[in-house]
Amino acid sequence: MRPAFIILTFLILVLSSGVDAQWTVKHLDEDAYTEATTIRFRNDSVGLMMGDNATILKSVDRGETWNAVDPGIQLHIRDFQFIGDTVVYAVGGQTLIRSADGGDHWNAVASFPGMQMNALWFMDHDTGMVTGSDAIMRTEDGGNTWDTVWSITGFGYKYGELVDISFPDHDTGYAIGVGRTQNDEHAFENFAVKTTDAGSTWDTIHMFDQTSLQTLCFLNPDTGYVGTGQGSIFNTVDGGMTWNKHNVVEFEDLPVLSIHFISDQIGYATGSSNIMILDSKGTRGFFISQTKDGGETWQTCDTAGINLHSIHFLNDSVGFVSGNYNLIMKSGGEIGGLPGDYPWHLVQSGNTEEKEDEHALVHIYPNPTPGMVTIETGDAGPITVTVSDLNGRLLYSGHCADPTLTIDLAHFRPGTYFITVRSPEFVVNRKILRL
């Protein structure tokens, strides 16, 4: 196995050469290993970044500086939305919170016991929807009361999760998710559903032949994009009836976690993996991509670095990405070129899987899982396996000398976890969804 640190050092020298750097670091919390899951701007000046451990950062100067806001409520924020000039809704865990002053102060609006909420969409101050581990919930009174308008079990699945939701206009909306069929423990279906009556009723419009769906973005009632966990983006131009697949990154280990379009032609995407991929072309841990032809082709910059989770561009000359350690970077328009002060010391160079060495490949399945997880390591020899939550808390640790190990996550709460496989030769981290 080639030494990862040599290639990583080379990348540091090449990618941080100052004159070509297009990105600048605007915020970083080295002691906060959290996922900055979403970054968005209300206008050209005011923006918010939210993530794990009730993290909220606010900027009022076009992203030059960011200040922490304490919501006073503990939750892992997964999604948020600006409504008008002052109202902001955010959701995560089992809680929906609301701000009436642009994100400075927050109150809990609703609780969803037993559910893990992933996304939301509000048409106005009163009418909106949240999606999560079981259903799509709808409110018409600002979150005081809720109706279940679509459910995993009602559609015939035993387990499942709604991943994301997008409304291009008041009446037309889309949601994506995954469900486990009743009869086959390992059979998962990835689906898209659609509403044309402001979320009151939903119909299935497409089944995707992909392991996982990650993010959803619609520009108008006909044109939309779905990012997958395999480095590709599907797009539709006929309201979700047909979808075309476009590869954004070369390696399937880099999922597309965020998509944002500033026009019908120009869009951006980002994503990352908990494993760095090492091969003859170098080391990669995240990517940033741009399209100028409506998603038909994508220009991509991929490299080693801190995991990125969200991207938002104000226009074709100002954009932002956010990631772990509450990292926020600002771009002058281009997608390539990391700054000289990029925090390379936080990049775990040992967290590397070498694609050219077959014995280092680790297979973990099914993902998502309702409980049982199989880990195959081939001829890697003795391994140590740990499972931790998003906060880094160790929940499971075990050793195995066999090529196959099965562990049971059925007693874990539904949500996202990290599985780490260690051997004397490699360390592999994978994110897994417990349904």
Image: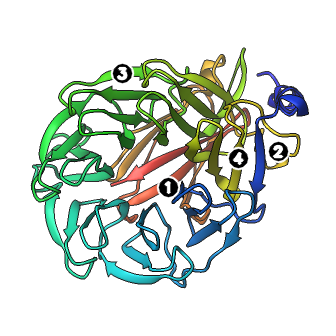
In the picture of the structure, the residue carrying the numbered disc 2 is 342
Identify the residue shown where x is 72% and y is 14%. 280
Q: Are marks 1 and 2 in contact (CB under 8 Å)?
A: no
Identify the residue shown where x is 40% and y is 83%. 108
In the picture of the structure, the residue carrying the numbered disc 4 is 330
Q: Are marks 1 and 3 in contact (CB under 8 Å)?
A: no
Q: As displayed, is residue 91 above or below residue 221? A: below
Q: Residues within 10 Å of mark 1 (few under 14, many from 20)?
A: many
Number of the label disc, if any, that sits on residue 417: 1
The kind of residue tagged 2 is Tyr
Q: Position of residue 263 (x, y in %)?
A: 45, 35
Q: Position of residue 148 (x, y in %)?
A: 15, 66
Cα gap from disc 1 to disc 2, whole angstroms? 27 Å
- SS for tag 4? strand
Q: Are marks 2 and 3 in contact (CB under 8 Å)?
A: no
Q: As displayed, is residue 83 above or below residue 187? A: below
The kind of residue tagged 4 is Lys
In the picture of the structure, the residue carrying the numbered disc 3 is 245
Identify the residue shown where x is 41% and y is 29%. 233
Q: Residues within 10 Å of mark 3 (few under 14, many from 20)?
A: some
- SS for tag 1? strand
Cα gap from disc 3 to disc 4, whole angstroms? 29 Å
- Which of marks 2 and 1 precedes in the sequence? 2
Horizontal side of residue 250 vs 83, given as left or right? right
Between disc 3 and disc 4, the foreground one is: 4
The answer to whether one can see residue 353 in this image is no
Horizontal side of residue 25 vs 435, given as left or right? right
Q: Are marks 3 and 4 in contact (CB under 8 Å)?
A: no
- Which of marks 3 and 2 precedes in the sequence? 3
